[in-house]
Each structure stands twice: as C-alpha cells, then as structure tokens.
Amino acid sequence: RAAWHSAHTDRFDEARSVASEALTIDTVAGDDSAIGEDRLVLGMVGLWSGDLAAAVDHLREGAALATTAAQQGQLRRALGSALSAVQEYEEAEREAQAALELFGDADDRRGEAEALGLLGVITMERGDAGQAVSYYDRAVMLCREIGYRHGEAVNTANRGNALWYAGRIPGALTSFGEAIDLFRSMGNRRGEALVQANASSIHHSVVGDDVTAAEYSRSALDYFVEVGNEDGAAQVLCNLADIERRAGHLTVAAEHIRDGLAAVERAGNRWLEVQLLSSDAQLKLAAGDHDGADSAARAALSLCRELGLSDFEAGLLSVSGLAKLAAGDDTGAQSATAEAVRLLSPGTDQDYLVPYRRGLV
C-alpha cells in the first residue's frame, strides 16, 4: 500500500524501492498471490514513469502467478496498457478483452469499467475514434453506477480525446471540462494537469480562446515542473509558445520553445520533439527568419518520417513551402506545397491548413 501511494503521487523511485522490498519478502515466503500484487505495482510504476520494458516484464510475470480471476484480470488489464504503450496493439487488445471477461466472471464491475476504458485507448490508438467513444461511454456509465469517481474522471477525459479526434469539438470540450472538475474535486492534480494540457490545445488551435488556453497551460506547467514531469512540461510549453506567437510576443514564445526542446531532450520524447520543431518553424516564419523556419520544418519532417508519423508530414511541408516563398524561392515553394497536398489523407493533422497554404503560394 505504501508503494501504491508513492506511485500515485509520482514518487516513482520511492515506489519502486518499496515494492521491490516487498517482492523480496514475498518471494522468500513463496506467496504467489502477494508476488503478483508486487509485480502489479512494479509494472504500473514502470508504465507511469516511462520504463515500459520493465513494466511489460513485471506484468507478464505477475499474470503467470495470479491466483484468482480478479487478480489475473488486474494484471492482464495492466499488461494490456503496457503493451499499448509500446504499440503492440493486437496483443494489447487480446489482453484487455481477456481482462474484461475475467472481471465479468468475478463480478468485478470496477474492473470491467477499467478494461472497457483500456479497450477505448487501444481502439483510439488504432484510429477508430468512434468505437473508442462507445467503449468510453460504457466505462463512464459503469463508473457512475458504482461511484468510482477516479475511473469516471479518467474515462471522461479519454472520451474527450476521442471526440476531439472525431471532430466533435463541443462534446470534447464538455468532456474535458467535466474531467477537470472531477479530478479537482478529488485533489488529483496529476489528472487535472493532464486534461488541462489537452484542453488547452483545443481552446487555442480550434476555438481561438487563448485566455482559457493560457490559463490551463500555466496551471498544468506549474504542476509538471513541481513533480519533474518533463513530457508534460514540454507539451504545455509548446502550447504556450503557440499562444504567445499568436499574441505577437515572439521573444517569450522562443523562450518556451527553447525550454520545451531541452525538456524533450532530457525525456527522450521524440513525438513531442516533432511538435516543438513544428512550433519553432512557425515562430521563425513569423519572426522573418525564413531559412531558420525552413530548417526547423525540414528537421521535424525528417523526424516524422523516421518515426512513421505520417499525419504530420503534409502540414510540415506546407510550412516549409511558406518559408521558401518568403525567402523568394518560388519554385521550391510550389514544389513543397504541391507535395503537401498530395500527402493529404484521413487523419492528417490540421488538414485544412494545407490547401490554404498552397493557395497562398
């Protein structure tokens, strides 16, 4: 229990140490049920702290030792989460479905809600936002029926993400607002900050409400800096850079980009590096540094292709085209934006900007 408490308050080193001590004691005692619980804690610590390989290993070992349907359901649900995080989606879905059945057999409705929520996450990652919303709706309903407020908050937040990707913006904002209120009412600053970071992106990029976007981002940044969450800090620094750029505060925006890139370098999060390089390209374009803008866009594009993030390629090429146009390279601008239009496909990030930029060229 002490390890769980430390893990839920982001004190991961402490949680790992305490759970490892418990694992040693339980291994000597030969208590498989207790060992399974220890492995569950260690697996979740690995998942939450970013040590995904360790998470998968602990959870596999724990699932093999589970002594009841309920415990096996917990471990297999957690294993599904870890497998999803390493993008092993087919196996992750099998584990989540197995967990859902095990929880049903054990009449564990909270477990069922968590398994449904995980299926929503996996389905979302595989590109089916509509099916993900369905899973989240079922999970939220179960959580409300049994009074499981944390589960309700998590699944409401995830439903907001799915609605966002499905283009249902009013529903997404409603879900995010409900989730923020739920996390805040429970004193869960981590959950509140994570939802605020996502809600900030919509308020800025879709609604144009930079007052709310900045409020959410600054609140989230305070928390992420306090607990040393580099990924979270980088995400909201990117949001803040875009907000300040729109307001014409280019020096402040550049500082946010610099701090965000330093954070992703420490965290090793290359997906967020793409976001920050994209923001840096647009900032340099606004500042009149056309060659710098083109270089940043091309660096982000190269990283996208290395990581297989095809949804961002068209947008980055269109930014590169605008930079070339501003630098007087009309031929290069035509070529880049024409390629950007050819790359448009379902799922392209901010797809509406690509033909607009092509039109400008």
Image (cartoon, rainbow, N blue to C red):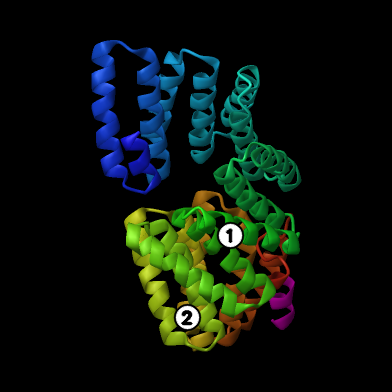
Query: Does the magenta portion include 254?
Result: no
Work out whether residue 13 or residue 264 is closer to the camera in this orientation and state it: 13
Q: Inspect the image, locate mark 1, and give the three-letter code of the amino acid beneath it.
A: Asp
Q: Residue at x 52, y 89 (%)?
A: 248
Q: In the image, 288: left or right of 210? A: left
Q: Are marks 1 and 2 in contact (CB under 8 Å)?
A: no
Q: Residue at x 54, y 37 (%)?
A: 84
Image spot of residue 176 (x, y percent): 63, 59
Q: Residue at x 50, y 50 (%)?
A: 307
Query: For the residue carrying disc 1, how many other residues have a C-alpha within 10 Å: few (<14), some (14-19), or many (20+)?
Result: some
Image spot of residue 151 (x, y percent): 58, 42
Image spot of residue 146 (x, y percent): 64, 36
Query: For the residue carrying disc 2, how many other residues have a C-alpha within 10 Å: few (<14), some (14-19), or many (20+)?
Result: some
Q: Residue at x 57, y 68 (%)?
A: 200
Query: Does the magenta portion include 359?
Result: yes
Whether residue 50 is visible to the viewer of this picture, yes or no, is no
Q: Is residue 258 above or below residue 246?
A: above
Q: Earlier in the sequence, mark 1 or mark 2?
A: 1
The secondary structure type at the circle numbered 1 is helix
Highlighted magenta segment, given as a residue range: 355-361
- Residue behind mark 1: 181
Q: Quadrant of residue 358?
A: bottom right
Q: Inspect the image, locate mark 2, and give the three-letter code of the amino acid beneath it.
A: Asp
Q: In the image, 228: left or right of 234? A: left
- Residue behind mark 2: 291
Whether residue 235 is visible to the viewer of this picture, yes or no, is yes
Image spot of residue 305 (x, y percent): 53, 54
